Image (spheres, rainbow, N blue to C red):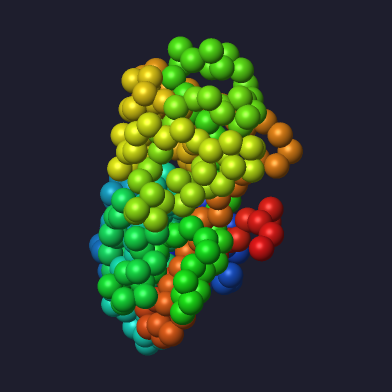
Amino acid sequence: MELRHLAGFVAVAEELHFGRAAERLRMAQSPLSQQIRALERELGVRLFERSTRSVRLTDAGRALLGPAKGLLADASVVRRTVRAAELGAVGRVAIGFAGASSYSCLPVLSRAVTTQLPGIELVLQGQTYAGEALGQIAGDTLDMGFVSLPVRRGITARVVRVEPLLVALPDSHPLAGRTEIALTELAREPFVTFPASRGSAVREATVQACHEAGFAPRIVQEAPDAYTLLALVGAGVGVGIVVESADTIRLDHVCFRRLAGADVPVLPIALAWRTGNRSAALQAVLCVAEQVLPTPPTYIE
């Protein structure tokens, strides 16, 4: 059974018109008809009921359609795998991720790599903070990772997302009824944030934004991750500054409000890798990442 005969059958079955199917396959109608007849002879059944006005699938044709599509899809995967192997795009690529920002980017990249690079296994390694990935990339225990800027010497990074910062506060807070909150209005508030010792870019951005607003944040408790931070906010321990993607984490008694003003603090999220890493598999994944995670046009270095 030839794949081209199956491809012709699927085209006719979907179009129910030999002329349109031939045009879709970029071939003449007569050779397509010959392919269908050859497939019918091989299977010993009629696949279509033909008349001068219509083309309809027989019961046998309907039964064949699903398996035929599956075989063609499998053949496509085989072709891509062989081509990838020829180009060296096989192997394992370990990617580090942390925080709500990478959760939005990672599924997009992972699905694209699975589809376009079937010869590559993308190994996902979660970290608590984006800063932890930089040391692992430099030490070759990670091939690439989602990080915050700036990066250290010897690491290349490309921004893939720009995250505005939001205020997370208890829904019972006096400011919860507002749509926007000026950072200066939080000067007397207790803050919940991430530990200073773990390389949290959100912690650093929080402190810097508060200093630029004319005050030092009064940090009353630290949280190891975004979920815990928001749980503490919901419990009334304090307010928090989080990236926009954290809004996807839904907890009772927590609300998110935009920061007011023309210069809302933002946190660039980048995909980083060791500059000297010449792995063909890594380079292939980076090419896919450039397609599906382009640098935001609003980002200016």
Q: State the residue at coordinates (28%, 64%).
A: 123
Query: Which of the two residues, 265 or 100, is positioned nearer the viewer here?
Result: 265
Q: Quadrant of the C terminus?
A: bottom right
Residue 32 in view, yes or no: no
Residue 254 in view, yes or no: yes
Query: Which of the two residues, 236 or 108, is positioned nearer the viewer here?
Result: 236
In this rendering, would 27 be left or right of 128? right
Q: Position of residue 158 (x, y in %)?
A: 55, 66
All told, the count of numbered labels is 0
Q: Quadrant of the N terminus?
A: bottom left
Q: Position of residue 188 (x, y in %)?
A: 53, 25
**Residue furthest left as drawn:** 44
Question: In the rendered image of this protein, does residue 130 appear above or below residue 272?
Answer: above
Q: State the residue at coordinates (39%, 56%).
A: 199
In this rendering, would 185 be left or right of 130? right
Q: For residue 28, which quarter of the picture?
A: bottom right
Q: For residue 160, which quarter of the picture?
A: bottom right
Q: Position of residue 276 (x, y in %)?
A: 43, 85
Q: State the residue at coordinates (57%, 72%).
A: 27
Query: Which of the two residues, 236 or 99, is positioned nearer the viewer here?
Result: 236
Q: Position of residue 187 (x, y in %)?
A: 56, 28
Q: State the residue at coordinates (56%, 27%).
A: 186
